[in-house]
Amino acid sequence: MSRMAWTLAERRGSRIAEQLGSPSLPINPRMIADKKQIAVAAKPLTGCSGCLMRRGDSFGILYSSNLPNEGMVNFTIAHELGHYFLDGHAEALFPDGDGLHQSSGPFRSSDPREREADHFAVGLLMPETLFVRAIRSAGDGLSAIETLAETCGTSLTATAIRFANLADGPVAMVVATEKRIDFCFMSEPLRSLRGLAWPKKGNTVPGGTVTAKLAAKPDDIENARRLSGGCSFADWIEGAPDCDCTEEVVGLGRYGQTLTVIWSDDEFEDEEETDDEDL
């Protein structure tokens, strides 16, 4: 799926937040579901984080009572709302009119509709205008993402994606599992540079980085340990400028993943945007 499809899904989420949400952060996805008469409930689900149910013209959302934090709960509800609001999703997921559709978790599926719903959730919970305004006072790097996550009631991963996409300075965020990259997002000052080779799903985390150091210790990942150090964008992204950067990484608990944020105070000149994807 193209990056444009993801961008359109995020924009749709932001529009729904503007129409049905509140004029300030955080955006409450339960309130939006209630306005559309969609019942929301927690259940001890197995094998999925949430699901959308349909019976005739009525919809309902279930989310797993085992989700670790409110940010994940909000994202799961927002994801299922994506299936409800995005054009063609309900028709494709419920071809017979009734049924139940399960979702595995944020940014874990390669199914195009699941990825669209993920990006819709990002836009819904962190609408662009409000989020960009919040970025200006949040600071830099991982601490800024943590501040924004608390403000928006969102998970670190979802917040880092939105931060990387909308930051006006050079920023990249990477999620990896067991030293293998799951996905990467970059800010516009990086995306606009020609000749970049995006980190691909399955690529190995670069050796010698603080992320590689943390990834070698599963217990530290589960205990949400964090590390920081110096690096270069060129260490992570082929064709990127070899400039001094800060690399910060935190373990994401029981998921066995690491979240890495790479950022610099240097300014890059925009060039012709590349047409590439991270997966």
Image (tube, helix red, strand yellow):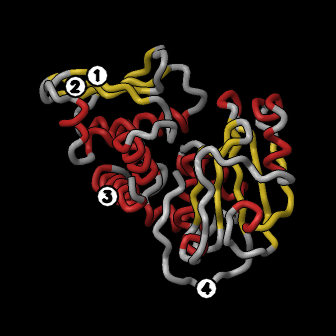
The residue located at (81%, 72%) in the rendering is 244
Q: Are marks 1 and 2 in contact (CB under 8 Å)?
A: yes
| Amino acid type shown at disc 4 | Glu
Residue under the point 31% across and 56% down: 12
Image position of 259 with respect to 257: above or below: below
Write down the residue under mark 4: 269
For the residues carrying marks 3 and 4, which lies nearer the camera in this image? 4
Query: The residue tagged with tag 2: helix, strand or loop?
Result: strand
Q: Is residue 40 visible?
A: no
Measure how far apart labels 1 and 4 are at the Cα level. 48 Å
Residue 160, image x and y in percent? 60, 53
Q: Tell me how many marks there are.
A: 4
Q: Residues within 10 Å of mark 1 (few under 14, many from 20)?
A: some
**Residue 54: image tag:** 2
SS for dot 1: strand
- Describe residue 226's horizontal placement relative to residue 132 as left or right: right
Q: Which residue is mark 1?
A: 100
Task: Indicate which label's residue lies in the foreground, 3 or 2.
Answer: 2
The amino acid marked with disc number 2 is Arg
Which one is earlier in the sequence, the residue at label 2 or at label 4?
2
Residue in the picture at 56% in, 83% down: 270
Quickly name the residue at label 3: 15
How far across and how far down the image is residue 222, in percent? 75, 30
Q: Quadrant of residue 5?
A: bottom left
Q: Is residue 271 visible?
A: yes
